[in-house]
Image (cartoon, rainbow, N blue to C red):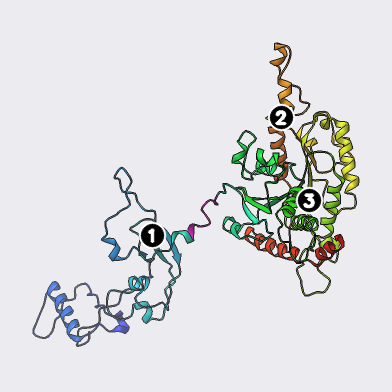
Amino acid sequence: MSESGHSQPGMYGPGRRRRRRRGERDVGPPGQNLSGPSRDREYQQRERRDGSEDPPGPLIQKTPIILAKPPGDRAKPPQNTATSGTPVLEKPIMLMKARDEGGKPGTPQETAAQPSGPGPSKMEKEGQRPTQPVYQIQYRGMGPSASSSAVDPMVGQAKLLPPEKMKHSIKLVDDQMNWCDSAMEYLRDQTDMLVVGVIGLQGSGKSTIMSLLSANTPEEDQRSYVFRAQSQEIKERGGNQSTGIDFFITQERVIFLDTQPMLSPSILDHLINNDRKLPPEYNLPHTYVEMQSLQIAAFLFTVCHVVIVVQDWFTDLNLYRFLQSAEMLKPSTPSASHDSSGSSGSDDGAEYYPHLVFLQNKARREDFCPRNLKNMHMVVDKLMAHSHLKYKGTLSMLDCNIFPGLGHDFLKTEVNMFLLPVHEGEGEDHLTKAGTYPLFSLLPGYRGHPTFSYMVSKLRSQILAMPRSQLSHTILTEKNWFHYAARIWDGVKKSSALSEYSRLLC
């Protein structure tokens, strides 16, 4: 042993005493013979006087550190209690992240990870970096007792909240043909959407059909429909209820667009009698009304997956001429590369066309006859033979079990056509209940078709099952669709093709 009482480091290791052999006496300093406990205390005192450090122990890896709330918030009494007085425990959120070596001094992670004694830790002296993760517990705004530095819960839980439910429709395009931005707050960053638009002549029942497809049932009062239908007063004076384009989105992320009547005589009468000032590019009121209708139809052909053409009698040839003109004036689908000349709408393969559904509203009993149904399909197929619109192959009445015994080969040229009978609350069904004999009055009247509610449910299921084609060269979310539709509407209003067409109408 050395004079200071330490063992030789090379022989016995740092800070360790040589073990006494059996039979060997304890020899202390000269003039002193100490027993075992006294000798150990003497050695410890000599080591402290020499100024040497405590013997280093084995290297211990850093263990995960659990950080709780700041000390200032721990003293606060819990304020989250239920109505019965029982405290409600807040569920913590555990975050795992790697230890930041170059963090700012004084952060809770670094303060808790520092050793209690002064100076760097043993691992930092030897050049080793801690690799263990730090588990941090935070209370993210779960109650009044949460820390002031907690994250706003609306930021982390915005995507978990259910979408806001609309109770009535709002304006997408007003009566002055100006774009409205109020629909933006109901849209989300989701791509699984379906856009359904409707066009038709005045009084054909467009708003009623869209309300039944979106949020209402036939048993409800029409005054509570999301798209306002014509009131009795408006029907008596031959007016129109809808103006511009109305917007409504369901909880199933289906966007419905209701429009003002196409080629409406009531809108033309309003322009003439009220002496409304026309835009400078239009000279005659009837030209302005027709161009408004063409702008709306061309817009729907560009931004919708499905466009429903509502008729209340079969059929008007002027409506098919109008559809062909709107298809001709439809703006080209924007291409992926705008720099290449002639790439926008140059070939028909890259052009987008929606699915077209012909809805025969207020159909009579004889319209459901298989022979008449076959003739209607043949007429529509011949009128739309040269159209690029997808008017057949995606909707079938034969799949609804409405005509039992008829196979799919019965309609060789089946188009997207659906028939809706007259509502039970109006029309001919009241006549069938009145009978001469009391026994016959107890029997239900013969309809020749299912009920109106059954037909509406079948139509809704087929409309919602329509293919959701890609509207542009990129997959659009709901918010992106809104901006895309606004750009298309601005392009339709400034279209040179529409301006030239309106000049030829004069």
Amino acid bearing label 1: Tyr
Q: Earlier in the sequence, mark 1 or mark 3?
A: 1
Is residue 271 a member of the stretch shown in magenta?
no
Q: Quadrant of the N terminus?
A: bottom left
Q: Could you say which quadrant of the image residue 138 lies in?
A: bottom left
Residues packed near mark 2 inside 10 Å, few (<14), some (14 to 19) or many (20 plus): some
Residues packed near mark 3 inside 10 Å, few (<14), some (14 to 19) or many (20 plus): many
341 relative to 503, above or below: below
Amino acid bearing label 2: Thr
Q: Is residue 147 left or right of residue 192?
A: left
Are the residues flagged by discs 1 and 2 in contact, CB closer than 8 Å?
no
Q: Is residue 20 left or right of residue 223?
A: left
For disc 2, the marked residue is 451
Magenta span: 156-164
Residues packed near mark 1 inside 10 Å, few (<14), some (14 to 19) or many (20 plus): many
What x and y, as percent, mark residue 413? 89, 42
Q: Which of the two discs, 3 and 2, sits closer to the camera?
A: 3
Kindly identify the residue that appears in the image at 67 percent across and 30 percent down: 425
Amino acid bearing label 3: Leu
Q: Nearer the viewer, residue 20 or 291?
A: 291
49 relative to 474, above or below: below
What x and y, as percent, mark residue 257? 68, 51
For disc 3, the marked residue is 263
For disc 1, the marked residue is 139
Q: Is residue 323 left or right of residue 223?
A: right
414 relative to 154, above or below: above
- Find numbered disc 3 in the image and state the secondary structure of the residue it sits on: loop
Q: Is residue 151 left or right of residue 253?
A: left
What x and y, as percent, mark residue 459? 72, 39
- Cα distance between the residues tagged 1 and 3: 61 Å
